[in-house]
Image: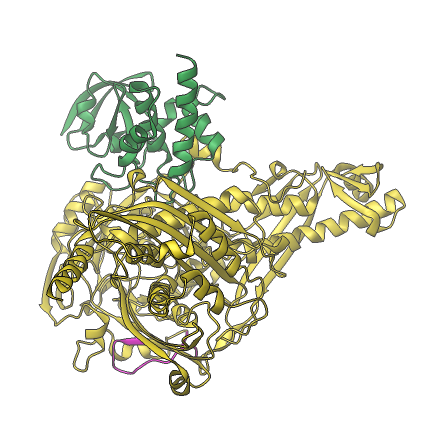
Amino acid sequence: MKIELRTVVNGREIETSVKANQTLLEWLRDDLRLRGSREGCGVGVCGSCTVLVDGRPVSSCLMLATNAEGKEIQTIEGLAKGDELDPVQQAFLDQQAFQCGYCTSGMIMATKALLSSNPTPSEEEVRDYLSGNICRCGTYQEVMAAIKTLAEKNLANR
Amino acid sequence: MSALGENFSRVDGPAKLRGWAQFTGDIEMPGMVYAKALRSGYAHARLLRVDASRAAKLPGVVAILTRDDLKGMNSHFGPVVKDQPVVAMDRVRYVGDIIAAVAAEEKDIAEEAVELIEVEYEALPAVFDPAAAMEPGAPILHGESAKSETRLDRDNFRYEKNSNVLSIYHAEQGDIVAGFKEADEIFEDTYSSQKIQHAHIEPHAALAYWEPSGKLVIYTSTQNPSSIRAQLAELFNLPQSKVRVIVPYVGGGYGGKVHPRLEPLTATLARKAHRPVQWVLSREEVFLTAHCHASVVKIKTGVKRDGTIVARKVEGFYDTGAYALTGPSTTKNGGEVGGGPDRIAHQDLTTYCVYTNTPPTGPYRGFGVPQVCWAYESQMDDIARRLGIDPVELRLKNLVEEGDRFVTGDTLVSVGISECLKRAAEAVGWQSKEEQQRRALQGKVRGKGLAVMIKTTMTPSNSSALVRLNADGSAVLLTSSVEIGQGTQTSLAQIVAEELGISPERVSVTFPDTDVTPFDQSTSSSRTIFTMGSAARQAAGQIRQQLLEIGAHALEANVEDLELVNGNLQVRGAPEKRRTISQLFQAHYGAAVGSMAGSYDNQTRGGVDPKTGKGKASAFFFLSACAVEVEVDSETGKVTIEKIVSAVDAGKAVNPRQCHMQNEGSMIMSLGSALFEEMVFDNGQPINATFLEYMPPSMEDHPRQFQSVIVETPHPEGPFGAKGVGEAALGPVEPAIGNAIANALNGLRIKDLPIRPDRIFKVVQSAKEESHEN
């Protein structure tokens, strides 16, 4: 069964129909071919499929595509403006805060969400907020360092 | 500026940070269909009937593979023993064993079809731990079938006929009986370790199709394209040139993707479907596909009162699961270094690789060594405590040194282990006297612990590299080394750049494609920087030599007086006399066109004689130390890692930051298995096969103080002195944590991993009860 869906993905308005049982992640990957969001666990706990829905971080493997009706979705592909990386991407690059890169999109999207709700998080707040984004390569130290530079910049600009 | 020893920015950064990097599961082909497997619900059963006729009628089903399709063709695969069927033939051997597979137009059709396949089982007795599997009368998993001439390693290991013992490794030196007679004190313990998930966040994935000419093409998330090519060629009776294996970015491996897992089935299904078939495992299926060998290690050590270790006997039992994969080599690896990094005159080391009705294992970061390290380094602290010797002093007294003859017969070179230990001890703030004071077992108590490790690397092994220099002074390295997150494309680019005197930014490194890139044994065993790095350096060196000769002619100088710097060939000390690489091409070819190629086939030589366990076990040795400070809540058993330091002898750090990140990754990974990670089974049924119940360490588990130290003892055969580091930090973490906990608890010791709170609670409670009774 197909259901009508009207939504906005990375600033692009989309009117389409989706399968009733299709997850947001499947729809993004299979239908829109946005493959930067990736499945790691399928049960919403590893964070590698994190996207922003109306600015809030969501495990897209757990949300049905139909629930995106009337909402704005942002994925990793929507962050950079041409050659210019998003500040979070740039900070991750500067700190080399990635290894295999499979969890990286989700880690960056969760960081976006964290900084938009709390521009100057403490280390404790970072650890707590990102505890749902698993990096088996163990790149946490560099991710925390990247977020610290962003928080310091935000503090200076306040 | 030198390209070497610099934190050169990773070449894969922009792609990975933009979400643009392609992993196997991101690739699609026109006409692609999706695979799903039917898996056994029984741990051990005979298959009476497999009937896919109802499933075949479901619209959208393209092909179904059952045992009927394998009749008359090669049905089994395996890198050492061909014991694993593409789909189950006569019986299933673990919960999750594959019985059949469906390819369908859509994923949910494949899932629905799998449910329609009818199977009748006849349950068989099953066995779940290696000790029980070695008992007389235990159900036999493979019998003679795995012991026949299909054993590729039949000359390399001992094995027992008609038993679950797949291989036995043994080595000895001196006279173990006399050794124990010399000892003043003897320590005997049994340690165990659990089944652990690799938990690479990218599940295994493959995409296979057959070209009409009969050539097989497969994209796969593997660490080992050459093994996949060889295994598929044998399975389908094809020349290796008719199997093309392409490996995009791999989302973590840690050993779990070294040998065929889903490639044989994906390729077989694609052949039947006449369509490209994509198979991406669910997380639950990953749990059923690979894990780390659980182990039981019995260790007996004899020491002199002054702390000299005189004799050590080790018996290790490795649970290899239902299929062999690399179990025999993992087990051998553990056996070779089972005595630890100590000079011990009398040693007797035996390890057993044993089948059980549990999911298959295979390599796991550390490759059989953490299991024995957990035993010998935990016991070392008990020895120190009993003898009243500082644990650092005791280790320094016994540790191997440069030029020592190891139990395997190797002469040790590039031995920075004492330096590692000293640096780790210093970083954790080790104070000899203070650390050994007794503490009141009340509330929260603190303790520090250390451990060291020695490990071999795959030897002999081959890596070939091909370098092409373009007329504009840029270069391409063709290599089959896989970018699994360790940054190999970057560090190999640095090596080529250093040799050619150009910037690493001008070097491009390929992804593996067996039609194009030369042979590499495997991206595992932390061998890439050493073995492929040497090959890449030699290949680039041939071009360098050619440039020098052209330049000598053009500049009327001696080759020895020339150097390659910043893309120029110049006279040393007179840089105004120089030519750009383009000008050298011009001089050579008459125009700035063409290319110059260098190619090198590198083999690290060696290997051990299976009868004696002697030879050259390793092209280089991993040496490392770990130091930890913990806080233990003696009322609840909760452990907090306050500080962890890992020190690794990298030989020469080509890219120091990447070396540190490998160490950090090893520390975090092993912290999980030290304290909480554990696959749980009930009669063979997996209980916690999801990330809801089995969680790798998160940022909240990341210790507040976390430090990686690199020691550089250059290796004469490594490129610019470099050795591998990928696994080096892993082994000593578990015993260092165990030792810190024992230190906090006045020597109370947990000998089974993981060191869960309930286990700590139990030993603290019984110690308290004992002290009341006294």
Which quarter of the figure is the N terminus of chain B placed in? top right
Place residue B164 in its image quadrant: bottom left
- The colour of chain B is yellow
Q: Residue at x 76, y 50 (%)?
A: B546
- In the rendered image, residue A67, in percent from the top left (x then y), is placed at 17, 24
- Foreground of the two, B47 or B542: B542
Asked if residue B731 is positioned above or below residue A114 in the image, the reply reads below
Q: Decide if residue B260 is on the left or right side of residue B45.
A: right
> Residue at left 52%, top 49%?
B710
Q: Residue B426 location in percent, x, y?
A: 47, 50
Q: Colour of chain A?
A: green
Residue at image location 40% in from the left, 57% down from the top: B433
- Whole-percent x and y of residue B262? 32, 55
Q: Is residue B272 visible?
A: no
Q: Is residue A121 above or below residue B117?
A: above
Magenta range is B153-166
Q: Is residue B280 above or below residue B600?
A: above
Q: For residue B766, what is the image quadrant?
A: bottom left
Task: Residue at 18%, 67% (x, y): give it.
Answer: B128
Q: Main secondary structure of the magenta part?
A: loop
Q: Is residue A7 magenta?
A: no
Q: In the depicted view, which residue is nearer to us: A139 or B526? A: A139
Q: Is residue B215 placed above or below B665 in the rendered structure?
A: below
Instruction: From the top left corner, tell me how far across and down residue B232 is, in percent.
Output: 39, 61
Q: Quadrant of the C terminus of chain B?
A: bottom left
Residue in the foreground of this view, choosing between B33 and B463 = B463
Q: Residue furthest toward the top?
A: A158
Which residue is at the front of the view, B442 or B515? Answer: B442
